[in-house]
Every structure is written in C-alpha cells, then in structure tokens.
Image: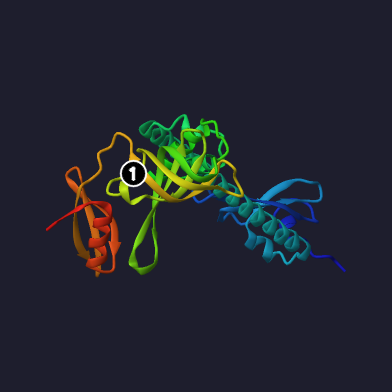
Amino acid sequence: MNESIHAFEKAGLGKAPFACVGVYDRGRLNWTSCNFCGASIRYEYIIHDADDRAFVVGSECVAKTGDMGLIDSMRAAKKAHRAEARAARAEARAEERRVANESRATEITVRAEEFIATFGIAAAVTVDHPIIKDIAARLYRFGSLSGAQVDLIKRLAVESRVVKSPVVEGQGISIEGVIASTKSDEGNYGRSTLKMRVRDDRGFTVWGTVPDSILGRPLAGLRVRFVANVEASRDDTTFGFFKRPRKAVLIDVESPTRARIQVNNDVWEIVVPDGDVWKKIAVHSTRGAAEDHCVELGLEIEP
C-alpha cells in the first residue's frame, strides 16, 4: 500500500519527517509570508525537515497537515515562546521599576541634602547616636524632617559632645544649668503640670516639675538655678529625677509680674505676657483656683 506524501513534501519544502524547532515574533509591522501558502504571518514557526533544512510557515498550515508529531512540536515551541515572552516582559517591568526607584532615590537624596543645608544639621546627622541614626535614615528615605525631629537631633548632637557625669543625689541639692526641654503633663482636677529636663553644668541631666516661680514664658534654652531633692535613675546614673524644687530663678531673665484669667472650653486659663503675645501657663477647673494660683505666683491679675 502506498504511503501518503506529506503536504510540505508535496510543496517541495523538504523531506519528511518534519519538526517545529521554534517560533519567531516579527512584531506588528514587520510580517512575512508563509513558505507553504504565501499568506502574511506575524509568527514564524520554524520547521526543519529530515535533512535539517529550514523553512517557515504559519500555525494554521501546520495544523492542516494532520501530522500529530509536527503539531505537538509546534505546540511545545509555542508554549516555550510564550514563557520566554512572559519572562522578558517581567524583566522589562523589573528594569523599569529599578530605574524609577533609582531616579526617586536620587531625587530624595538631593532633597535631603538641601534640607540638611537649609537647617544647618550637616554635623548633627553624622553623630554616632542611635536616635540620630534612625532620624537620619528617615531623612534620606523621605527627603525631609519635622521641626521636632530637627530640634531633637540638634539637642542630641550637643549632648553627645558633653562629658557626662553621675547625678549628685540627696536632699537640697543645688541645680544650675540649661533647660533642655519642657512637656505638659495633664494631672487630676483639670490642672496641667509642666515638666522640664535640665542639663546641669556638672554633666548630668534631671527631670521634674517646673517650679511655679519661673512659669509664664517659653523655658527651653534658658538657664535656671534651683534647689531640689534629687534621685538618680536605676537605668542611667547620669540621669535623675528631682522633687520639691524651690528657690528657682531664671538666670539673666526677667519674670512676668501680671496675668489674665480667661475661660476656654469650660476651663480657666492663666495667661501672662511674653513680648507682644500672651502665653498660657496653667489651666484650672474654676476661676477661684486660677486666682489662687496667680496669688501663689505673685502675679497681679488684670481685668
């Protein structure tokens, strides 16, 4: 019985058996012709004959041959081609993201350097301190810092250059130094308590309630002298807590002598003059309590 002749062999394209060895995508604008039927094709299926001669055809012509071995090899080539295309697209997207990230990183670095120059913190951000390192990392991640973060790294940088010494403990200890910072602590009965952190000239730091006699103005950065009972921290011998502060004075600073009492959101506030503005120094639940506090501070109440 005569065996049927393969369609590609009849067309003079080669000698059976045939196999598909690959696929080539010519793109949207550069199509070619099928060597079997002459139709325009975008995807060239590369066919090798028994003598390893090559020609290209479209997928439909391969399917019409009925040659299952050839069709299976075409499907395998198509699958491999799609996998390679997906990998190429993924690599291209990854490269785009890398370039975009590098560009953004460069932009943020430039912004960070400009921020450092504007706020004069070039030396501060290089200090070997864990908190400063963390804030500096945030600066180079986002390109800027908040005002509080700038103040913090400046303060920590200054403190890191100060030789620290153990806290002087005991009753009636004289403290003299710079008020590094203050913080309001809301207590009972609607009355807030202002706390302060003081760097003593001897090299230690203490924390406690601001004495009434120096309330009435922004205190951070001012020098203060007072007497208090001091106890060192269990975790840091160079840091301590003071209680019962007395005889407190701001050095080379004039204290306020007058105040006003005003109601705001159902609480009574004591405000004192600070240049051209009035600053709040305490709040009370009743006007009577506010008046008593003014008397304690030696402040004359204005109408």
The residue drawn where x is 44% and y is 36% is 154
Quadrant that contains the N terminus: bottom right
Residue 267, given in percent of the width and then of the height, sits at: 26, 67
Q: State the image quarter where residue 116 is shown.
A: top left
Residue 13 visible in the picture: no
Q: How is the image coloured?
A: rainbow
Please state which of residues 107 and 36 is positioned toward the viewer in this rendering. Answer: 107
In the displayed structure, would residue 238 be above or below residue 163?
A: below
The residue located at (43%, 35%) in the rendering is 110
Indicate the position of residue 275 as horizontal and vertical percent values: 19, 42
Quarter of the figure that contains the C terminus: bottom left
On the image, the x and y values in percent for residue 96 come to 52, 45
- For badge 1, the amino acid type reads Leu
Q: In the orientation shown, which residue stands out farthest toward the left?
A: 303
Q: Of 228 and 69, which appears nearest the observer?
A: 228
Q: Is residue 292 left or right of residue 233?
A: left
Relative to 158, residue 278 above or below: below
Q: Which residue was labeled with disc 1?
A: 219
Q: Nearer the viewer, residue 248 or 270?
A: 248
Farthest-out residue, front? 172
